[in-house]
Image (cartoon, coloured by chain):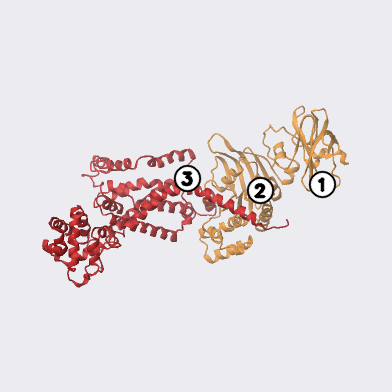
Chain colours: A orange, B red
Amino acid sequence: MSGSDVNDQYVRFINVKKSYDQKNLVVKNFNLDIRKGEFVTLLGPSGSGKTTCLMMLAGFEDVTSGAIEINGKSVQDVAPYHRNIGMVFQHYALFPHMTIAENLAYPLKVRKLPSSEVKQKVKDSLALVELDAFGGRYPGQLSGGQKQRVALARSLIFEPSIVLMDEPLGALDKNLREHMQYEIKRLHEQLGFTAIYVTHDQTEALTMSDRIAVFNDGVVQQCSHPSALYETPANSFVADFIGENNHIHGTVEECNEQTATISLSRGDKVSALNINCPPKGEPCILSVRPENLFIAEAGREFDNVISAEFITRLYVGDAIRYFFKMSDGAELMVKMLNDQDAPVIEPGSQARLTWATDRGLALDKPADKDSVEAA
Amino acid sequence: MSNPELTQDEIKQADRNIRRRKLLAIFFVAPLLLFIFVTFVAPIGTMLYRSFYHPTVAELIPDTLAQLDDWSEESGDLPPTAALNAFAVELQTLAAERRSGKLAEEINRAYPGASSLIKSTARKVRRVDLAELQTSGGQLVLDAHKKWSDVNVWRAMKKSGSVIKDDFYLTALDLERNPQGEIVQRDTQIYLDLYWKSLKIAFYITALTALIGFPLAWYLANAPSRVANTLMIFVLLPFWTSLLVRTTAWIALLQTNGVINSTLMSLHIIDEPLDLLYTQFATVIAMTHILMPFMILPLYSVMKGIDPSYFRAALSLGAKPIPAFIRIYMPMTVPGLSAGALLVFIISIGYYITPALVGGTEGQMISNIIAFHMQSSNNWELAAALGSLLLLLITLLYWLYDRLVGISNLKLG
């Protein structure tokens, strides 16, 4: 990262730590640089410290140690109402006693804009989120998706350079959520603000973000582009948290720069890419995505083959999930498109599972909690 | 899916089910309904009835009143002899039954001085022969006292004799009928002043509880639950102590040699004790203390339900904390504030014990005068009229509140 360019370090978290009781750290040494106009998602299970980071940036929580900078200036002593950061809350936080238009006008009125300008901006803003006719209604008369659009419009109307979103789609149902993801993305591209988005939904993070910071236990496990996170996760937590995954326990037999050879419990030797492989002789995890694992009987065969017992299959519609059990008890899943190649297997029968070396990842043991900073 | 309509039998069955459920519901509610009727609806109904239906005089001297019906009171003449004779006969009967005192008391309200007049005359006619009374009893009565020749006595008697009357309401509103039968103001305003004072005191108490209760409720709603729970016990503590104990504690605090006065004097802030007890101030301060939980609890429950993100949203939109609090947070507390205010106001306007104990004459409220008429002056009808007017006043205020704030905006807990 080129440190001199201020646009590349528009928002900076520098060694940020946060503790509520001076004993337990909620956020442990958080470092992140965000480019101007970038869409960054903080992704992690609940309680991992991602919302706390957002609240510290917004100014609602103070930083226990470290610094947060916006545009090269520390925001430590700037009150939340002077930070000029737009914020979208999970439960919308639309003021229930004001109409939609009044809600939108509120940030402009506190900035003492002339009323004609306020009117025009409210009108434009309603048009932006396609709610032109709803200005006179109260939030209680709107559906969840409409409320969310108003909340979004309100956080944008005073033209903040940064917009924070704290699980904004958490309260919506699945279809609406997908539509709103698209809507947020559209506004981001149209207006070019810097967005920091918090979610625990990995699909949402993958579809929307330029970069994703995966949180666990107060630590960023990996911060990278969605494809990098999915295809080359830095450790088993990331591999597990993003998408579905098969875990195979093994011991490192040999490893070089590119690949690692792993011996499995029954003595099979398989190879995989060396992503984060422990040294020779150590236990490790081999991770293969369900869509990269194939049933040899269905026609294709790759470098690595193991045998497993078929248990059952789950019909999902566009895909079929096949469940297998290895002799040491570990379960494996194969995801296949529901086309004419999808095989029918007798439950209890042995099948051969196969994958290509460059689709298997050799990772650390999950107990290993070393933080990996990729960005 | 051939026939989407219900058959007759199915409809009957459904009706039966609904009826059975309704019966069951009534069965569950019945004891409470009965209880409410016996202890609440019936007494209030009786009270309302009593405030205008007053048959006592009509029962005491029915014949006289029947005779007086033909007499025109505006003429200025005395009633006909037949009426006077009938009165003499009935007075004798009442005297023999020792009920003439009751009549004296009743007529005295309409004609001050009639009490001794009737009692002394009753003593005189008691021993007279019945036959003589029937023929010349009227003359005997007129001779007994010169006041009997005053037409107004008879007017008062005729007026008292009517069963349905508005006199008590007129009295309760400081009005009266002059001899011409027109409604005029009384010289002294007693009850209207008292109503006005009760309203004022109730308003002070409501304002004080809101002023003190609002910040406390806010703190309770935002404090960590351990602190909030401990403090909540202190808020509720007054509920668990006897009302009398709390009121007498205020007497101990406020009296001339009480805690407040002796402390202030020992600190040389004042030279002689202040008159704190038996004032309006004492009523207001003691009732504010007693009614505080009624303000804090609804406020607390409403504030507890306000998502802190509203306030944060206002800050993030650029509002400074105080304007954000006033413009965003306060309007959301209106349901709790208005529920608390309504509770405190309505409870305090009819409060009895505390003003009676610490209010003295200055701190009396309308309920104290109602109690006085119930217990001391034995004028239940006036008490009933005063009570009915109080009920009307509260209903009016409630209606006004509904118009201004809206009952649907109310949140009690």
**Quadrant (top left/top right/bottom left/bottom right) for the N terminus of chain A:** top right
Say whether mark 3 and mark 1 are on the same chain. Answer: no
Residue A215 on image: x %, y %: 65, 41
Q: Is residue A371 left or right of residue A246?
A: left
Going by the numbered disc 1, the residue's amino acid type is Asn
- Marks 1, 2: nearer the viewer: 1
The chain carrying label 3 is B
Foreground tag (3 vs 2): 3
- Kind of residue at badge 3: Ala
Q: Earlier in the sequence, mark 1 or mark 2?
A: 2
Say few, some or many: other residues with alpha carbon within 10 Å of mark 1 (under 14 / 14 to 19 / 20 or more): some
Determine the residue positioned at 71% across, 50% down. Answer: A207
Residue at x 79% of width, y 46% of height: A319
**Residue sitting at x 86%, y 47%:** A340
* Crowd rating for badge 3 (residues with CA inside 10 Å; few <14, some 14–19, many 20+): some
Query: Which residue lies under the disc numbered 2?
Result: A40
Q: Secondary structure at mark 3?
A: helix
Distance in Å between CA atoms under marks 3 and 2: 35 Å
On the image, numbered disc 3 is attached to which residue?
B221
Kindly identify which residue carries mark 1. A338
Measure how far apart labels 1 and 3 are at the Cα level.
55 Å
The answer to whether residue B306 is visible is: no
